Amino acid sequence: MTHPLAPETHPEELASFAVDGALERLELLRDIATDRDPVNLHLRDGSARGLVCTLLPVGTEDEQTGAALGFELTVAAPPDLLQRLPLPATAVTIHRDVKVQFDLLLRADARSPELLRAELPQALWHFQRRQAFRIEPPPASPVRLSIRYPTAKDTSRSVKVIDISVNGVAFLWPRWDDRLPEPGERLGEVRLDLAGQMPLACTLEVSVVAPIEAAGSGVDGPRHKVGCRFVNLPLAAGRAIQVYVNAAQIRARARLARDRKRNSASS
């Protein structure tokens, strides 16, 4: 990587650390604002100048610009900055020992020359690979996944979900489709049903395809597990998945605590 507060510019580096979910991006920005992490704004106007600021609490849109992000400058800005706005910039900060970077378009804030506004970023990079909590859907709270397959006469078929997290889902590839997907392939027209809630429309990108049975086992050969990540998941859908996963995690912990208590009582 480059200097800790310099923007990363290598596409192959950025692609590995993109935060695709709108809900995840929003929560990360809120954490940065709460912790008041210093943010370096690198102006992309050829001047190589930067600004130092803090991110204001996220979520309230500015009445004049409609922008949801606010920045308060902590170091005096160049005298001609307001005249040159709006300007594209790359924001870089260190949040809880991890580098975070996102692109934005800076606008003026009529209330003060020390304030800047920007819209929520559509791209954000968190330079640490994170593992989301995955759950196996319990029988009492099932998850159903329906995928539209061209090989199935353009009809949607349900597949068995193996596990799910706020980042993605894994499922069994159906035996009746002999064309295995490739990593990087996107599956559109996917519907996710969380324990009888309103079905969620989403797009999946295949991350891994792996056999889960020994070759030659079963009449039709090995079954395959397909692991996918959610792509551009709408905020409401991401929140619904997070609520489902959190509730399942709480139930699993409570069940484990009851089992431990029962075992200790019988010993």
Image (tube, rainbow, N blue to C red):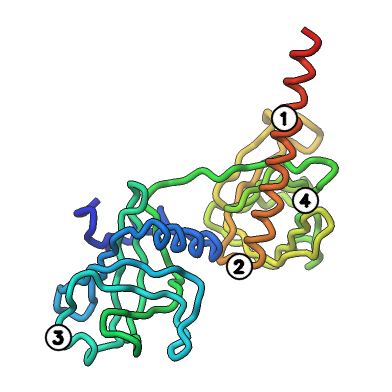
Q: Is residue 190 visible to us here?
A: yes
User: Gap between marks 3 and 2, in whole Å?
Assistant: 38 Å
Task: Name the residue beneath numbered marker 1.
Answer: 216
Task: Name the residue beneath numbered marker 2.
Answer: 235
| x and y percentages locating residue 195 in the rendered image | 81, 53
Between 53 and 225, the one lying in front of the other is 53
| x and y percentages locating residue 80 in the rendered image | 16, 88
Classify 10 Å Cα crowding around label 4: few (below 14), some (14-19), many (20 and above).
many
Q: Nearer the viewer, mark 3 or mark 2?
A: 3
Amino acid carrying label 1: it is: Gly
Task: Name the residue beneath numbered marker 3.
Answer: 79
Q: Nearer the viewer, mark 4 or mark 1?
A: 4
Q: Nearer the viewer, mark 1 or mark 2?
A: 2
Q: Earlier in the sequence, mark 1 or mark 3?
A: 3
Q: Earlier in the sequence, mark 3 or mark 4?
A: 3
- Residue at the image point whose x is 76% and y is 31% from the top: 255
Between 34 and 1, the one lying in front of the other is 34
User: Gap between marks 1 and 3, in whole Å?
Assistant: 73 Å
